[in-house]
Amino acid sequence: MNDLTSDKNIPLDNSEMILLRGKSGTVAIVKAGPRSQFFLETEDEEIVLGLDPNDLIVASAFSAGELYENGLKCVLYMVRELKSPLIVLSKNHKASAKLPIVVSVGERTVISCNIKPGTHPDQDVLCGSDEFNGLEAIGTSTGVELKNIPPCVITRVKFKI
C-alpha cells in the first residue's frame, strides 16, 4: 500500500505492464513502444496521434479482480500490438455507461472520476474509479513516474498474451 500523496518512479520496458490494483478499480500501463502513430476516431473526424516510444497507453477498469486485469491486458494489446483505434463517443452516447474499460495514450495521463467514460477526446485525462481520482502517470525514458498514488497494490508483470 502507498501513501495518498506519494510519488514513485517505476522501471518499465516494452515487455512489461504496470498494474495498480485498488478495491473498486484497476489501472494498467504500458509503454507506447516503437509504433509512432495511433488513431483517435470521433463521430466527426479521425485524428492521427504521433507518439514517442516512451509515451504511455493507460487503461482504466471500473472494477477489480483477475477478470478485469485480463481485460485490461487484452485492451492494451489490441491498441498497441493490433493497432486498434481509440474510439471517442459523443457526450450523450448510451454506451458510455456500459464501458468496463477505457483507454488513453500520450506522454501524461491524469485519472478523473468527473468525466463520462469514453467521451473525452483529449488524451491527457482518463475516466477512472473514485479511488484513483487524481492519479497521474508520466512516461519517462526509464519507465513511468506516478504521482498522487492512492492506497493500492502496484505490480509490474510481463505484457504478453
Image: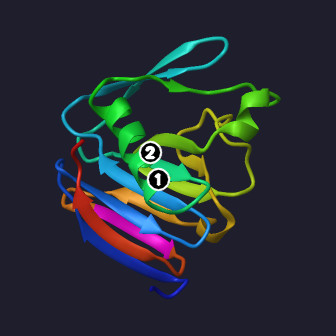
Q: Which residue is under mark 1?
A: 67
Q: Amino acid at mark 1?
A: Leu
Picture quadrant of residue 128: bottom right
* Callout 2: SS: helix
As measured in the structure, the alpha-carbon distance from the residue carrying label 2 to the one carrying label 1 is: 6 Å
Q: Are marks 2 and 1 in contact (CB under 8 Å)?
A: yes
Asked if residue 125 is among those painted magenta in the image, a careful observer would answer no
Q: Which residue is under mark 2?
A: 71
Residue 130 is left or right of residue 150, and the answer is: right
Q: Position of residue 43 (x, y in %)?
A: 67, 14
Foreground pick, 10 / 128: 128
Is disc 2 surrounded by few (<14), some (14 to 19) or many (20+) residues within 10 Å?
some
User: Magenta stretch?
Assistant: 144-148
Picture quadrant of residue 32: top left
* Callout 1: SS: helix
Q: Position of residue 159 (x, y in %)?
A: 23, 49
Asked if residue 146 is among those painted magenta in the image, a careful observer would answer yes
Is disc 1 surrounded by few (<14), some (14 to 19) or many (20+) residues within 10 Å?
few
Q: Is residue 107 visible?
A: no
